Image (cartoon, rainbow, N blue to C red):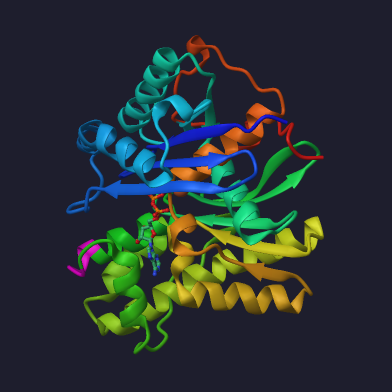
Amino acid sequence: MIRVICLGIEGTAQKLGVGIVDSSGKILANITKYQPLVAGIHPREAAQHHAEHMKDVIKKSLQKSKLTLDDITLVAFSKGPGLGPCLRVAAIAARTIALIKKIPIIGVNHCIAHIEIGRLINRVEDPLTLYVSGGNTQVIAFDEGRYRVFGETLDIAIGNCIDQFARTANLGSPGGPKVEKLALNGKYIPLPYVVKGMDLSFSGIYTAAVDSLKHHKIEDVCFSLQETAFSMLTEVTERALAHTEKDEVMLVGGVGANKRLQEMLRTMSGEHGATFTVPQPEFLGDNGAMIAWLGILMYSSGEKQSIEETNVKQRFRTDEVIVKWRE
Ligand code: ATP
Ligand code: FE2
């Protein structure tokens, strides 16, 4: 088979990523650039940031891979889900490359890209995946030709909950690592535990955590926020694991960097005889390599998109995609 070299552009939220991957799964480059958050994400400002840095990030990733644009045989971009203005910048850059270089273009689902790069990097076969980030919270598993969502948040994402809390408590941004550090010296105080069937809600716990700051030490609130929210996530993942009977659990998304969440999931997985994996930081959060790799998988399974079909999709559901590249 001829070697496909794909350049993938990630731009769903505040991070801009450009990755270059070949059809053997070799990562040739994976460059990320993001605007540090001050007061939460502003879609148009983030889009402006991506537009300003696009050329430079593409150039850096080509330099890193020791290739030129002429060597690229496929271009992929994050079609959604994400923030409209950011998605459009990534799509326009990808279309421009496709048209100038006369190469095929593929818009991919961002959530599925997280799973596929994890399967590639960690050599897992068929994991039950918990995807937790600033914009997403989903429990996903492959079943009958699609990635099915077994549970998800009904309101805000877990990363958003933690970041908003951290901002209100003046801990700075991003909040995840700060809350994790303070939690090491905290004690338990009750916060609302909201699991509805297989779905989760984090807005109540955010409000209660902010309220608790009036009467409790910040360390105790951070500890309890983590214990409560991560127990909710672990409960839903555990039930999905029992239901799907998978024997691998994978954690992806920026919040997956949290050691306490990893510990809870590792323990739960062990109790069910399942292995637990979490990709290294470079491939855990948003990155361009995951977009390029999913582009290759889709292209190799016969996917073709015309330029007219490369519109972005802000609410692109994980289970909409027919997965032709897996048995
Ligand atoms: P997406 O577009 O997929 O929603 P994102 O823009 O939120 O992604 P990511 O890098 O995947 O980007 O995730 C960032 C989130 O991860 C932030 O909410 C941040 O607080 C959180 N995070 C990072 N490190 C930790 C940590 N150690 N503990 C908890 N949360 C963390
Ligand atoms: Fe993501």
x%, y% of residue 116?
Answer: 62, 47
In this picture, residue 26 sits left or right of residue 57: right
In this picture, residue 222 sits left or right of residue 192: left
**On screen, 79 above or below 279?**
above
In this picture, residue 172 sits left or right of residue 322: left
x%, y% of residue 216?
Answer: 27, 83
Q: Nearer the viewer, residue 33 or 2?
A: 2
**On screen, 31 above or below 318?**
below
The quarter of the image holding the N terminus is: top right
The quarter of the image that holds ligand 1 is bottom left
Query: Is residue 81 at least partly visible in the picture?
Result: no
Does the magenta stretch mainly form a helix, a strand or a loop?
A: loop
Asked which quadrant contains residue 221, the reply is: bottom left
Residue at screen point 57% across, 16% down: 305
Q: Nearer the viewer, residue 46 or 290?
A: 290
Tell me if residue 318 is in the magenta stretch: no
x%, y% of residue 287?
Answer: 43, 47
Query: Is residue 3 at least partly visible in the picture?
Result: yes
**On screen, 105 above or below 24?**
above
Residue at screen point 82% across, 40% down: 327
Residue at screen point 35% across, 24% down: 93
In this picture, which residue range is highlighted in magenta?
A: 167-171
In this view, the residue farthest toward the front is: 66
**Number of labelled discs?**
0
Asked which quadrant contains residue 70, the reply is: top left
x%, y% of residue 126?
Answer: 75, 54
In this picture, residue 142 sits left or right of residue 139: right
Q: Nearer the viewer, residue 310 or 290?
A: 290
